[in-house]
Amino acid sequence: MSQSSTLLPVDLSGSSALVVDSNTTTRSIIVTQLRDLRVKDIQPAFRISDARKYLEGRTYDIVICDHFFPQESSTGQDLLDDLRRGGLLPFATIFLMVTAEARYSKVAEAAESALDGYLLKPFTTARLAERIAAAKLRKLAMQDIYEAIEAQDFPYAARLCLQHFKQRNDYWMYAARVGAELLLRLTHFDQAQRLYEAVVQANPQPWARLGIARVQLEMGLPHQALPVLEGLTQDEPGYADGFDILGRTLMELGRFDEALNAYRTATQLTPASISRLQRQGMLAFYRGEQDTTTQLLERTVRLGLGSKMFDGQSLTLLGMLRFEAQDKRQFAACQLELRRMALRNPESVRLRRMAEVLTVLDWLLNDDVHEAVAALAPLLQAISQPDFDFEAACNLLTVLVLLWERRVMVPRAEDTVHALGLRFATSKAMAELLEGAARRHEGYCEILERCNLEVLRLIEAALAPSLTGDAQRTVEDLLAQGSASFNNKVIETAWLVLKRYRSKIANADALEARLQPLRQLLGTAYNKPVLGDRNLRQSGGVSLRGMDTPPVAPTLSAALPAGLPA
């Protein structure tokens, strides 16, 4: 046994490791050092893209990654950020960053991504052993919290985090970060905000300041989140997560050009981030910036195709742009990859609908109008389904415009646009994004703009009886309207009236039994402008494996109130 192996207080003989470094000599040295520490299962990688694929395919106990890759635009930090954001690194994995002295300050900031440690070149086997041991100690100190999360006992895990924080146990700051994330996802917003504020008071970490803004957003208070984020991004101009959430906030406020600038800054800070490229590209599409959209989404496909962080919506929008350019070869490539994604994920209704969108355009590109209209039928029928979301509505609107531009008559197209508007144009921001999808059809845009006002008038009329003492009629009217349109805002208004006047409503329990499944099915997130897969973890959050898995949606038969069509 080598002397260095005795320096490690834990046994690594059954461990696996991934070594990511573009320099062959450095990579070989690290592999040798790990073997001296009795690690036998070692996978080398010399490119970021290869490392991402390895990490998506299996779990490693240890990842040692260089920060700088001279032949690539991305860094080890970009890889770590993307993996954390995508929930692809389990708690048990130790991630160590390797850096030269000149880049130490950049890597020191990596603690924001819950980096387990860093190593300055050159380093000895003993130094590597110390770093692994220190990371293992933190994992051990947090073990009770990790085990509670793995067991999906999230309230208990949050209580343990609060206990670690209050008692200032080892790694109490990281425990606070995990605890605040748990409270936020459990919708305990007041507690989450208090914990973030306590961290800021103790040590004003950027992630804690960002956490305050995230809580305010989840509470539906983007106006309060905005000054917090503006201050944060001014103080921390290199904090990409801050610009992500700033962009989201500006979107909710309907300030789309400013949101696009925020997303652009985040992408410039991390040019190889798949999720950020996608987000900027999607918003650029709805703002009519076709050249910018094409460049961003092409880069996304090159970097991310096959990655778990790649979103099929990128292929959908890029396919639409290829269709408009009449580029059959490139369109076919988008359609093929999207079909492959749908086949690999047969449970995904979202991907299936995206593939149906490109099928319509495929027939149209080949001048078969009859088949194009026939292929449109499943999408038109789906708009009455509860799981037909805002993204699907935008895609359908764009397809309807493309058909109209080629003089293809879709039966009752304006009625379809009106139905989509009544369901999703629930705010000025939502209406404007829908209009962005239909931007080249003036008539459709006018319908969508009127729908927002129509929803407001509908709610106002339904609320009138409650002002004269008949709250039951108000709830029943709103429930009927919301059930017909699946408009989340109408359903939530009915819920608020029921809560306020419950003691005066004779059949309150029965109304609640009808409202709750709809609230669960539609969700408050469906009333906000979201780009891409809404189930992906937000920027600034902590990867909580077991909590990052998208929730299983209730079945329609279980979720629909009695009397509603499935």
Image (cartoon, rainbow, N blue to C red):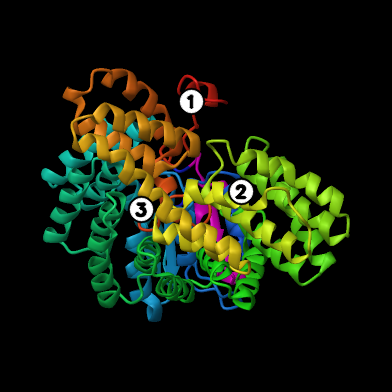
Q: Which residue is mark 2?
A: 415
Does the segment drawn in magenta span residue 17?
yes
Q: Label 2 vs label 3: CA separation?
A: 41 Å
Task: Tell me, for residue 541, which label it has, or none.
Answer: 3
Q: Residues within 10 Å of mark 3 (few under 14, many from 20)?
A: many
Q: Which residue is mark 1?
A: 560
Q: In the rendered view, does 368 fall on the left or right side of 220?
A: right
Under mark 2, the amino acid is Asp
**Is residue 562 visible from the viewing direction of this image?**
yes
- Give the residue drawn at x 51%, y 58%: 448
Q: Nearer the viewer, residue 306 or 521?
A: 521
Query: Nearest the camera: 298 or 157?
Result: 298
Q: At which x and y percent is residue 93?
A: 44, 47
Highlighted magenta segment, given as a residue range: 13-42
Residue 387 picture quarter: top right
Q: Nearer the viewer, mark 1 or mark 2?
A: 2
Q: Is residue 260 left or right of residue 396?
A: left
Asked if residue 427 lies in the magenta stretch, the reply is no
**Mark 1, secondary structure of its residue:** loop
Q: Quadrant of residue 377?
A: top right
Select label 3 or label 1 by which is in front. Answer: 1
Please name the residue shown 50% across and 43% down the image: 15
Instruction: Give me the residue at 11% from left, 60% from top.
Output: 201
Identify residue type, mark 3. Gly
Say whether disc 1 or disc 2 marks the residue closer to the N-terminus: 2
Alpha carbons under labels 1 and 2: distance apart? 24 Å
Question: Is 510 placed above or below 305 here?
Answer: above
Farthest residue, direction bottom: 102
Residue 535 visible in the displayed image: no
